[in-house]
Amino acid sequence: MRKRLQPHIMCGVGDVAKYVLISGDPKRVERIAAFFDESVKVGDYRGFVTYTGSVEGIGVSACSTGIGCPSAAIVVEELAKIGAETLIRVGTTGSLQADVEVGDMVIASAAVRGDGTSRSYVPTPYPAAADFNVTAALFQAAQESKRKVHFGTVLTSDAFYGDVDNLKRWSRFNVLSVEMECSAIFTLAKLRKLSVGAILAVDSKPLMGRKKGEFEPGQKTGELDDSVQEAIEEEIRIAIEAMKILKTRG
């Protein structure tokens, strides 16, 4: 019987490992794969790039989700159909709190469902929560990091250029940061019985005058800031260490 491929990620059963690190940016997926002992590109279609390889004998994949919940939900659905069991989002986020600085990292325990995609699956009161075991593994793996790590709730929003008053509102509720995929990823993972977690590098402070916006060519701002690039490297390392912890625990 010929292998059947998923229509967007263009991968089939056997192409991805049980552990998958997911990231919005296809280029970041290449960076993640560079941490593997060995890897091969198994999919590249419509911006969805997938690598599969191993780390210390453990099978692991990396797959891009694109920007926003509709795209991320497609990836979670298709990965679930071809054998993925544990997902760790390795992404970026904008701080909503004064003590969460650019270059820090956030481990998300849950996400405010400010998106539309997850509401297409379940009613608004349904929680978008990360898996305890995955989150605990991320927290343990982050203990040796020299970068500051925050733990708590993030806001998922569909609108990058949306209402600042909405961000201020959630900041008052002690939500740590804003990003664009976690709520759908967490919700869909629970519905499809996958384990899920997220670690995010802080790349901006939209309420404190350090927005992620247009810039001059060659200028290092937003995600291109040196401290953010270092945080992205560190969160990849932490995610891989967390995967190893989870494998050890069985």
Image (spheres, helix red, strand yellow):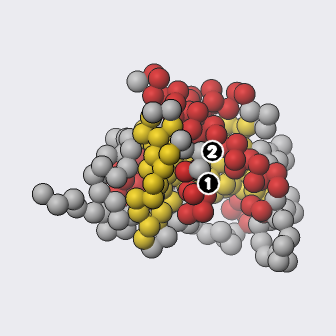
In this view, the residue farthest toward the left is 1
Identified at 51% across, 60% down, the residue is 64
Q: Nearer the viewer, residue 156 or 44?
A: 44
Secondary structure type for disc 1: helix
Q: Is residue 243 above or below residue 88?
A: above
Q: Which residue is mark 1?
A: 31
Identified at 48% across, 63% down, the residue is 49
Q: Check disc 2: other Cα within 10 Å, few if <14, some if 14-19, many if 20+.
A: many
> Residue 46 in the image: x percent, y percent?
45, 73
Looking at the image, residue 168 sits to the left or right of residue 48; the answer is right
What amino acid is labelled 1 in the image? Arg
What amino acid is labelled 2 in the image? Ile
Q: Check disc 1: other Cα within 10 Å, few if <14, some if 14-19, many if 20+.
A: some
Q: Nearer the viewer, mark 1 or mark 2?
A: 1
Looking at the image, residue 188 sits to the left or right of residue 211; the answer is left
Q: Quadrant of residue 193?
A: top left
> Residue 116 in the image: x percent, y percent?
48, 64
Secondary structure type for disc 2: helix
Q: Which residue is mark 2?
A: 236
Q: Is residue 202 visible?
A: yes
Q: Is residue 132 above or below residue 177?
A: above
In 3D space, how far apart are the residues under numbered discs 1 and 2 (Cα atoms)?
8 Å
Looking at the image, residue 225 sits to the left or right of residue 194; the answer is right
Query: Which quadrant would the N terminus be assigned to in this image?
Result: bottom left
Identified at 70% across, 27% down, the residue is 143
Q: Is residue 123 visible?
A: no
Image disc number at residue 157: none
Tag 1 and tag 2, C-beta contact below 8 Å: yes
Q: Earlier in the sequence, mark 1 or mark 2?
A: 1
Q: Is residue 59 above or below residue 167?
A: above
Identified at 86% across, 70% down, the residue is 219
Query: Which quadrant would the C terminus be assigned to in this image?
Result: top left
